[in-house]
Image (cartoon, coloured by chain):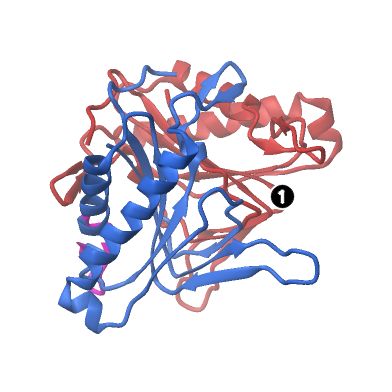
Chain colours: A red, B blue
Amino acid sequence: MAGEAPSQRGRVVMQQCLSARLQVKPPFDTEEAEYVEISRGTVIYICFLKGADSSTVEKMAKATMNVRLSESENGKFISILDLPGDVLVVPQATLGGKAKGKMMQYHSNIAKEQGLELYNAYIEQSRKILDGHAKWKEAACTLKHGTYGNRQVLRMDTNGPFSHYFEF
Amino acid sequence: MAGEAPSQRGRVVMQQCLSARLQVKPPFDTEEAEYVEISRGTVIYICFLKGADSSTVEKMAKATMNVRLSESENGKFISILDLPGDVLVVPQATLGGKAKGKMMQYHSNIAKEQGLELYNAYIEQSRKILDGHAKWKEAACTLKHGTYGNRQVLRMDTNGPFSHYFEF
């Protein structure tokens, strides 16, 4: 596999969906699992690597909210803000993995506590950008997100996931 | 966003699934759409970049079939060969995209005809590796794949997509 780009601090995969459902609390004892759901929009898998900080979060939130990956009615690609569409953020530490032979190693991943802090900051900043965009706000779209550190039990229906990968 | 690693020839995202369904023929006139389905296994999104050739395909097939991303009953991570599990290959040219401002550009993507050739070769080689592995073969697992150049209408149910990204 090709060498890694220098000084990566975050990795993101974005997929478009018609609907998606994510478990945010696993079943426990007699309690049923809890889920969040979104309708048409984008699923954003995020992973922070060592060296990531608030400036990484800022770039990541700005880029993911503004990048034109969503197909409009006339076939043009527009941002999730302008679609306007729902957002589901999925913490996905596995994206930091690097293959060594047949095994995956996660040595570049940020420490869990810092990762959680940056994850929360990413959600806060993304929400701010979304809420600040009149078209998105008026459409009563929603931002939902997974629980950091949990297994991300996800179901998704797409009209083409149209997967994109980003490094920060 | 961070700079790209030099001499990338292919990009792959792998996600684990409990089941997945992919459209392989869109609806046309009075004909209904056609789909392929898999049960528990792995969804492999592949994209070839300029410079990719048969050696890229070989590395990609070997790596994706052997990498240990599938969770066994005792919580260990094993290959799709040893799970054993189903494989769904999804051509995903969008993975070759690079953001320029808010727009995506796909200048690194391989020409369509060459891409189709390498895509077919990847499926053939992966099938060979799978069929050559007694445990996989005996379990009557299946490899399914999308139609190159089509919209990849995908539905997926996971117990955690456990997304991984690879460069070749």
Residue A28 vs residue A84, the one in the foreground:
A84
**Type of amino acid at the residue the image marks with label 1:** Arg
Q: In which quarter of the image is the C terminus of chain A?
A: top left
What kind of element bears circle 1? Answer: loop
Q: Quadrant of the N terminus of chain A?
A: top left
Q: Where is residue A155 in the image (x, y as percent from the top left)?
A: 55, 62
Compared across the picture, whether B79 is left or right of A136 comes to left
Is residue B73 rendered magenta in the image?
Answer: yes
The residue depicted at 45 percent of the width and 76 percent of the height is A29
Residue B90 vs residue A140, the one in the foreground:
B90
Q: Is the magenta stretch mostly helix, strand or loop?
A: loop
Report whether residue A164 is seen: no
Compared across the picture, whether B4 is left or right of B138 comes to right
Packing grade of label 1 (10 A; few <14, some 14-19, many >=20) is: many
Q: Position of residue A49 (x, y in %)?
A: 33, 30
The residue depicted at 23 percent of the width and 83 percent of the height is B138
Compared across the picture, whether B66 is left or right of B116 comes to left
Report whether residue B143 is seen: yes
Task: Indicate the quadrant where residue A133 lies.
Answer: top right
Tag 1 residue: A40
Total numbered badges shown on the rendered structure: 1
* Residue ranking furthest to the left: A101
Residue B98 vs residue B18, the one in the foreground:
B98
Q: Position of residue B161 (x, y in %)?
A: 43, 56
The residue depicted at 63 percent of the width and 29 percent of the height is A65
Task: Indicate the quadrant where residue B127 lies.
Answer: bottom left
Q: Where is residue B53 in the image (x, y as percent from the top left)?
A: 28, 38
- Tell me where the magenta segment starts and ends, as one range: B67-78
> Eyeballing the image, is A48 above or below A54?
below
Compared across the picture, whether A26 is left or right of A88 comes to left
Is residue B24 rendered magenta in the image?
Answer: no
